Image: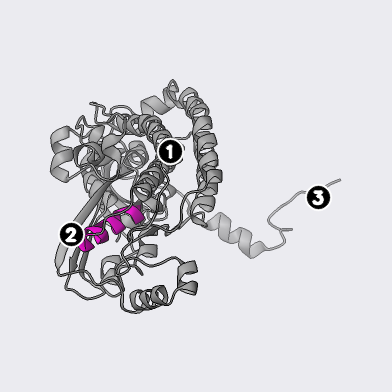
Amino acid sequence: MEERFTRENAPNEKIIEALLSKDTSVVMEEDALEHEMILNMGPQHPATHGVLRVVLRLDGELVLSAKCELGYLHRGYEKLAENMTYHEFIPHTDRLDYISPIANNVAYVMAVEKLMKIEVPRRAQIIRTLACELARISSHLMAAGAMSMDVGALTVFVWALREREKIYDIYDVLTGVRFTVSYMRIGGVAQDITPECIKMIRDFLNGLPETTIEIGKMLHKNRIFLERCENIGIMSAEEAIDIGWTGPNLRASGVAYDLRRDEPYLIYPELDFKVITRTEGDALARYFVRFDEVAESVKICKQCLDLLEREPGPVLADDAKHVLPHKDEVYTSMEDLINDFMLVNFGQQPPKGESYAGIEASKGELGWYLVSDGTGQPWRSKIRSPSFVNLQGLSRMLEGAMISDVVAIIGSIDPIMGEADK
């Protein structure tokens, strides 16, 4: 017969005694839920997208106020640019918005070319337009996937990663690198696009509508997704303009402002596409603007591919004083070897002056302001990064929301901390 466990035969009587004699009663003199509470959300929280810390003042589950604090990720890039040549800084632009690095390349080199008054060949401009739209597709899909994951729909996030891998395969063939591409050059692009790469892009674009239909079936009639995103984080058009919002977040508040149409650059003026807007200004509207913009980017990419197949030509400007020669020319021509030596060691030396170039990046207006003192390094560099501006509206949107809405609101503005903490 099994021996009964008693205090007398316990293996460690002192432990049992300590447990039994301890007063474990809890007296609630006041209800904790009736008092305000300070809650730190992030930067380790997965829904804060990186080094964002949000300090919330709560009354129960109601957010009374919120303060946002950016951590350290890429701090000091503007000063780094002032201590290296114009060409040397191109790889650093990849790290700012690491979801669409190739678009960051384009914005930076456009500012440099404007400063140096370099005319970029048409074929290079078409390739840049195509690359920017592929970056927009990749970024918008990841934004939709991350936002849906934040509110519980993990499958869409996995589908977005799958499509992004296909774009990385294209980058691998186009640029030689999958992630941080550094593909742009001052005066053009590093190398021409190949027929193989054009076919890969066409195959990807033809298959993408099937994926977007799948995402639509998964989310657009999903009661949980809709009710978690609708009527939360509302930003009116006036408030969005006051804060300085641009891009999909601004267009979701009803403002039809798009640099591709309103301040055209590259070959956008000759392309057919629509500027997508919504009037609700809530988290769901911001999601739908990005989702619909993917289809517009597909239209733009197909037009660029048609132009590339019809219009051959150089992809680098013929300007030995400012444009690095191809390596095969460096190895076979003494003049190009000397030019390469001078540009690598002393950098391009634009005339004294200043320039600003902005593009319609996936998060909004991404711009570079450069000041030249005539030397091989910029005297001043300033980045207009859209995520930094977009986050300024977060405190305003969180006030009055429920704590369960916080992750959906953060995800709806698509923050990338690499460019927020620049």
Task: Name which of mark 3 and mark 1 comes first in the sequence.
Answer: 3
Residue 311 position within the rendered picture, expressed as x and y whole percent measured from the top left: 40, 42
Is 336 located above or below residue 414 in the figure? below
Give the residues drawn in magenta, as a range: 104-117
- Residue that mark 2 sits on: 355
- Precedes in sequence: disc 3 or disc 2: 3
Residue 394 makes an appearance in the image: yes
The residue closer to the viewer here, 262 or 422, is: 262
Crowding at dot 3, Cα within 10 Å, few <14 / some 14-19 / many 20+, comes out as few
Measure the C-alpha gap from mark 3 to mark 2.
89 Å
Give the label, 3 or 2, closer to the camera. 2
Q: Is residue 316 above or below residue 142?
A: below
Q: Secondary structure at mark 3?
A: loop
Choose top left, top right, bottom left or bottom right for residue 293.
top left
336 in magenta: no
Quadrant (top left, top right, bottom left, bottom right) of the N terminus: top right
Tell me the residue that label 3 is attached to. Answer: 3
Q: Quadrant of the C terminus?
A: bottom left
Q: Amino acid at mark 2?
A: Ser
Between disc 1 and disc 2, whose residue precedes? Answer: 1
Quadrant of res 18: bottom right
Q: Which residue is pictured at 76% across the width and 48% down the height? A: 4
| Relative height, residue 216 to residue 177 (above, below) | above
